[in-house]
Image (cartoon, helix red, strand yellow):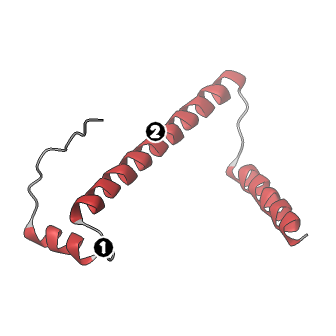
Amino acid sequence: MKTASFPSLRVDPDLRRAAEAVLADGESLSSFVEDSIRAGIDRRRLQQEFIARGLASRAEARRTGEYFTADEVHAGLDEMLATARTKRRR
């Protein structure tokens, strides 16, 4: 399989030193950058999915006219948390 490369990136020397200062034992700057890019991609995908779910929820609420107050949502979440804690203790 062929590999591709990212374009060369010019950064402030302080940024490079900061990145090098946090490298794990045996970790290269290249692998750190690759891992960071992968994590950024994952984070962006999660953000996009979150926004899409929110917009779909808004559209559904507008369609049905069914809305919930923050207190109702919090009460439901508290109930879910209490149920999970009870199951965990067993």
Task: List the residue tagged with mark 2.
Answer: 48
Are there few (<14), some (14-19), or many (20+) residues within 10 Å of tag 1? few
Up-down: is 9 above or below 55?
A: below
Residue extending furthest toward the right: 90
In percent of the image, x 33 and y 75: which residue is there? 24
Foreground: 28 or 77? 28
Residue 3: % across, % down: 25, 40
Question: Where is residue 88, by image quadrant?
Answer: bottom right
Given the image, on which type of amino acid does mark 2 rest? Answer: Gln
**Residue at 62 percent of width and 33 percent of height:** 57
Which one is in front in this view, the residue at disc 1 or the one at disc 2?
Answer: 1
Q: In this view, does 67 lie above or below 86?
A: above
How many numbered marks does the figure carry?
2
Label 2: element kind: helix
Instruction: Give the secondary structure at mark 1.
Output: loop
Label 1 and label 2: CA atoms lie apart by: 34 Å
In the image shown, does 32 or 16 lie closer to the viewer?
32
Residue 34 % position (x, y): 29, 54
Residue receiving disc 1: 26
The answer to whether mark 1 and mark 2 are in CB contact below 8 A is no
Q: In which quarter of the image is the N terminus?
A: top left
Camera-side residue of 79 and 74 = 79
